[in-house]
Amino acid sequence: MTGKIIKGIAGFYYVHTASGGVYECKAKGIFREKSIKPLVGDETEFEILDEEKHLGNITSILERRNVLVRPAVANIDQALVIFAIKKPTPNLNLLDKLLISMARQGVNCLICFNKCDISDEKEALELKRMYSMAGYDVLITSTYSREGTDELAARLKGKTTVLAGPSGVGKSSMVNLINPESNMQTGGLSEKIDRGKHTTRHSELFGIDDETFICDTPGFTSLYLEGLEKQDLESFFPEFRKYNGKCRFAGCVHINEPDCRVKEAVENGEIHPVRYESYVKIYDELENTRRKY
Ligand SMILES: Nc1nc2c(ncn2[C@@H]2O[C@H](COP(=O)(O)OP(=O)(O)OP(=O)(O)O)[C@@H](O)[C@H]2O)c(=O)[nH]1
Ligand SMILES: [Mg+2]
Ligand SMILES: [Zn+2]
């Protein structure tokens, strides 16, 4: 039998087959022999142990198109990065790091600013402007008023998309809206600290049609850009590329150097100052974080 892993919890993998049945599988052999950990999104071969109870054992994992470490999923076409415009207040530095992390893993991102029903239109448009200027594809949505959600659903068509973003921004709400059979639990916010409640604990993949899949994931609050060299950071800011090699000094990192084209672009409004500040902040972090041994 063959099937796709849609969920993994405590050593059990739920494998969806073409016939529509889901088998609860273990992966005894693979773990021991090759130390491969099955991932949500993996295409597998498995043997049926009990047809009536739909129990099985995964015998092999088919070759992966790609593997994402954070969140841990395989065979992804794109990431939908979701932040709320408010409630919780967006941490744009975290958004920028997430975009960098996805780019380093070779995954294209679509950005969605959600909860436009409760936010100021100006704020929403400014966020859209900021990230459009940087070269990203941005949607403004609300799972309540459904603004932007048809357009979003259209962008997902024919692809496998992983959702990523902080807790409480509406990832599971969006999954439920796009695929009403998902039935993911959604949670409120803890008002005092303006944060989500980490309602989703496990990644789960849903088939919308034969070619379209969407993967809900747990929210997260911080991200560490493991192994990124500070001088390579600029290459993950698409809006800096235009100025590549044009600064006065070769190897300019666009912070303290004179005659820097990037800083000029910030001053004349071609690069958004918030994105530039975020660049400087991440640069400092990369410089000051001691490697953990
Ligand atoms: N006002 C408003 N609230 C929303 C919207 N979408 C979701 N919410 C609410 O935001 C809260 C969090 O939504 P979830 O879908 O659970 O958020 P999540 O991103 O899945 O959070 P985690 O699973 O914790 O990572 C819930 O109370 C939702 O009802 C929206 O478009 N507008
Ligand atoms: Mg959730
Ligand atoms: Zn420069």
Image: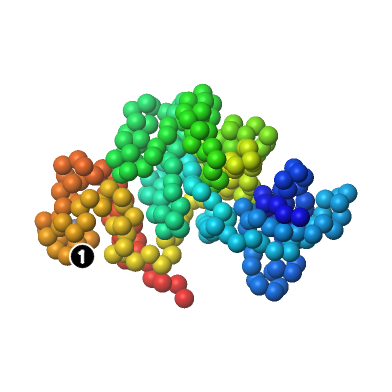
Q: Nearer the viewer, residue 269 or 247?
A: 247
Percent position of residue 2, x then y: 72, 54
**Residue at the spot 67% in from the left edge and 49% down from the top edge:** 6
Which residue type carries mark 1? Gly
Q: Position of 207 compared to 228: left or right?
A: right
Residue 85 visible in the current orientation: no
Q: Quadrant of residue 64?
A: bottom right
**Residue at the spot 51% in from the left edge and 28% down from the top edge:** 150
**Residue at the spot 53% in from the left edge and 29% down from the top edge:** 143
Q: Nearer the viewer, residue 189 or 49?
A: 49
Which residue reaches farthest top?
145
Q: Nearer the viewer, residue 198 or 40?
A: 40
Q: Is residue 58 above or below residue 85?
A: below
The residue that label 1 is drawn on is 251
In what quadrant does ligand 3 lie? bottom left
Residue 136 visible in the current orientation: yes
